Every structure is written in structure tokens, then in C-alpha cells.
Amino acid sequence: MASMEKRLQKELQAMTKDPPPGVQVDQESCSRVMNEWIVDLEGATGTLYEAEKFQLQFKFGSKYPFDSPQVTFLGPNIPIHPHVYSNGHICLSILTEDWSPALSVQSVCLSIVSMLSSCTEKKRPPDNAIYVKTCSKNPKKTRWWYHDDTV
Amino acid sequence: MAGRRTQGLALPDSIIVNVCFNSQQRSYELDRCSTVAELRQRLAEDYGVSVSEMKILLGGSLLADDLTIEGSGVGMESTLFAIQRRSSPVSLKGDAAIFLSQPLIATTTSDANGSDNSPSQTPTNHEDSKAGVSPHPDATESDCSRQLLDQYFVFCKVCKEVRPGRLRVRCSVCGDGAVLVDKGPGSWDDVLTPGRVGGTCQTLHCEQCIPVFYFKCAEQHQGNVSDTVAALHHIRPNRRSVFCITCEDVMSPVVVFPCESSHVMCLSCFISYCTIRLHERRFVQNSQYGYTLPCPAGCPDSLIQEQHHFSIMGQEEYERYKDFAAEECLMAGGGIYCPRLECGSGFIVDAVDSRVICPHCKYVFCRNCREAAHYEECAPISQASGNSQRFSDPDRAARAQWEKQSAHTIHETTKGCPGCGTRTERDGGCMHMKCARCGEDWCWLCVKLWDRECQGAHWFA
């Protein structure tokens, strides 16, 4: 869908020109394929994640922005947080049932920074161990959770 | 006055209008820049009425003398109504700028001109065609005023797309358009609710009248096409150059959601938004507005209030929309469908008994498994509809096999929602299912309600 690419280009332009604090798009990743972005995040000052660096991976389907992007943490440093599984999956409602085409890469990044900032204790989700264990058995089958996968 | 004959081709700076006087219609060729006063003069001469008593009505209002034909909103093939009145209780200003500042109409003379009507196709039938010579209208100004006049939008079934619409009025009793309204409608309620704006029918011997507003497509359609089209009141010209909430382009016209922030979406994004939501069956059923969608930003009180807006998706999707809407409405009222292939009627069931009789075809079936009524437990689907076709003719038997095969495929590829039993296909994603029918969260593996254990053990497995 052409509207997806047009919208992504506009978002990329805005994010490059006027990036929100602590958020930076990896230009190289976008130049390879438009529908996969890497975004560098930095933990906000005065929080448990201060000065820590993270990477987010965004994958956009052809229905974007009417359908949510797949967003996961990537790379060596996955934040230790009650809503982030150690394989990078994030439990955040705007990435699933609360997604709206009025949201954007920028608003997702800001929500994630804010989710990290409001954390008071660094720990994994309670079901992390078993979840990651079952996932690692079959990594290729692991897909992101769409709430609306009933067609 | 010098007649200006056009030798087969109408000049681009003139238009043809129909004028109705005492239920008789005549065509006139008018210069776009001539004034309403000049037209009154001509009509007065033609009909032998004094100029001061000759008035011209369009869309329920008298046209002011100083308006030009173009500025009054008269378009190619517009129908004007000439009436004879001793005095005029209504004073009007023909100020097109009034449309700029107001979201709704102040006068009813908005009449976008379909300027791309080909004048050469229009029959030049006018014994009495006379027009003064006027300078050629300034093109930029003309485009600009035309844009201002595109106040209303309709979905035209002939054009199969959103078009500028023209507001018209007719008499509720005789159906004639020679109606003088007491005041211009000030809101959509005034337009959509007959009786809110009073008026008088100018047709002879017709006294009781409630003006009825209606819309027509700004394009002229040949043949016997119904004049009335549905007004899309959430669609507006984007005079304020607001960005689309989705693609961030500035387009016009746009859909303006009825939320407090009045979020704006361009038509192309609105079509995608509706189509994708429809395919996911994620419209919402509302008791007041039916099967509809909210503002994509999730604002409260933002539902699209009129279903014809969804016709923008195109006929095929709109038909699907209507099917879904009817189904949701029936289901919301506790209704079910007759499972018999030839029937499929929807109806409301009062009794709690599992045996249901279709009121239409009298088929008796089990409410739970949708097979023919039975007294035992419901049979598994592969055994149901067994070999009752033994004595049928070969065609019937073949068809039954086909249907059986289809039922078998459905059974193989789908699972029933543990909440409502709706057969559900999983085409990817995780094990967490959300029922599109009843909203239940359930596990594809366990076929039971989704819980923390499923999330821990096999969420993505």
C-alpha cells in the first residue's frame, strides 16, 4: 500500500529533523528497507535506566498505520523491566489492542521511554523464564502477538 | 437587448438554466457575469409581469438583485423558480464569504457548479435567449468562489464517488420546488429534520407546506435518475488546511470526526481505515448510530453518525458492511440465523429450548449445533448430516457431498470460540485469540479462556 511508504517517509523526515530527547533513528537501517527500522533509545536521566543504551526494532506491515507495527527490543542490552521479556518482547497495550493510526513511531518510542522511566524496580516479568524457554525451543515460530488474529 | 445565438456551441462564459414559472419550464442561456436583476427583467418581459413583482427562488431563498448568476451559485442546468409576489418579506445578502466562517449554511443558495459539464452537449433551445455582453470572468476568482461554494458533499450512486452536493428544497405537499423558506437552515438538524424550518409553497392552490430539504449531486445526470442523494455531513471542505491524522497530507474534502477535537482524516485514509476495520470485523455496534466506527484517536463520543459515509468504500465493501451491520444488529438483539442453505433468514428467538423453528421456512433445528433437531447430545460435526441422501437423485447427492466437504474443511481448519462457538480460523500470530464476535480472550491450543498459564507456557509457541 503506497500510503504506508508515504507515511513512513514523513515520519522518518520528522524524526530525523526533530528527534525527541533520547531517541534516534538508525538511518542506515531505514535506507536498506523502508519497512524495517532500528531506533536507538537512551534511558532518561534521573531514572533506573539513566545512560543505558537500547535498540528497538520496528517492523511495518502493508496495513500500517491502520495496523500496529511489530516492536521489539534488540541487541545485547534488553532492559530489565516487568513488561519486557528477556527476548525483547514488550507487553504494551498500544502495540496491540490500543493501537490507533493516529499513533506513530515517535509516540511508541516516547511511550516506551516513559514506561522505562516510571519503573521502580528492575525485574523481569513473572512468567519470563517459562516463556523464554518455550520460545527458544522454536525461535522461528515465534511471532509477535496480534490481538486481532482472528479472521 | 441583443440576442446572442451560439450556432450550435454554447460559449464557455454562458450557462443554460431552467426557469419554472407557474409550473411551466423554459430554458434560458445566461451569461455567467450577468446579474439576477437582469434575469428578473427578462422574465418579467417574457411573462408579462411587472419587474418589481418578479422574484427568483433557488434552494428555498430569494436571490438578491446584485448577485451575478455565477456568484448566486446557479450552475449549468440548475432549475430556478420564478414567482410573482407583491412584496418581499425576506431580505437576503448574497455574500459568498459567509460560507468561510461558518461550519454550516446561513443561506440556502449554495450551489456548486459542475463547471466540467460540457456545454456543447447541452441543447440550446431558447427562443428567448438574450444576454448582455459582459467581460470574461476572471478564471482564478471563479475557481476560488466555486471552491467556497462546495459546502456539502454527497455520495452519488451514478458517479460512484463523493461529489459536491447541492442543497435543494421542495414542498412536502405538492413536491414542487417553488418554496420560499422563512429562514436559511442554521444547522444540520434544520436540514435533516423536516418542519424545523417553516416556509410557504408558491405554487397556486398549495397552501399547507413544510419545506423538505434534500441534496442532489452537483453533476447533471442524464435520464431518469433519482434526484435525491444521501448527504455526508461529516465530510467538509478543508478550508482550514488541517493535516490528515493518518497520512499528514492536507487534502480536501476531509472527514471531520464528531469528537471534541474534531479530528480530520482525508478520504483516501478514511477508505483504508474503514475497509481494514471492516475486514477485521472491528466496527462497533451502537444503539443510536448502528454499526459504525469511532475517531481513530480513540476519542469519546466520536462515532460516525450516518451509515452512508461507509458507502465511500465502494459497492462491494458497502454490501459487506450492510450484511455485517444487519447481522450485528440481529445478534445484539439475541437473534439467530436459519442454517438451511436455501433459507438463511435471521430471526429473534424467545424460548430457551434448544429446538428452534425457522419462522420463514419452518425448518426445525438445534440451536447449539445448527443441525436438524434431535433429542440426543449434539453429534460431532463429521458424523452429523449422515447418509440421509441415500434415496436422493444423483445431483442432490453430489451437492450434499460438496457441502459435507465444505463443512469438513471448516471443521478441520477452524476452532470454536469457547465463549460463543463462532468458528474461528487462525492465520498467524500467537496463541492468544480475541473473538471478533463476542470479544472473548481465548487460547488456540487449549481452546479455553486465556489465562496466565497459557501466556507463560505457550503464548508464542
Image: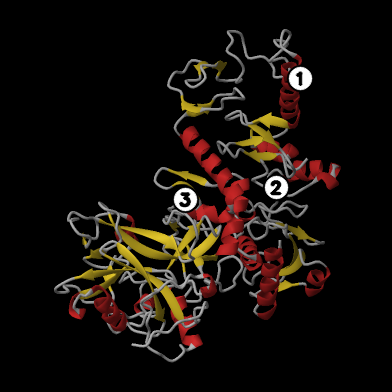
The amino acid marked with disc number 2 is: Trp
Q: Name the residue under label 1.
A: B398
* Numbered-mark total: 3
- Residue B39 position, x and y percent, is 31, 79
Q: How crowded is mark 1: few (under 14 residues within 10 Å), some or many (20 or more)?
A: few
Looking at this rendering, what residue extends furthest in the bottom direction?
B135
Mark 3 residue type: Gln
Image position, residue B250 (x, y; %): 56, 74
- Label 2–label 1 contact, CB within 8 A: no
Does B167 appear above or below B414?
A: below
Q: Crowding near pointer 3: few (<14 within 10 Å), some, many (20+)?
A: some
- Which residue, given by chain and number where applicable, does mark 3 sit on? B307
Quadrant where the C terminus of chain B sits is: top right
Quadrant position of residue B448 = top right
Residue lying farthest to the left in this orientation? B86
Element marked by disc 2: loop
Report the Cα–Cα distance between label 2 and label 3: 32 Å
Where does label 2 land, which residue? A145
Q: Mark 3 lies on which chain?
A: B
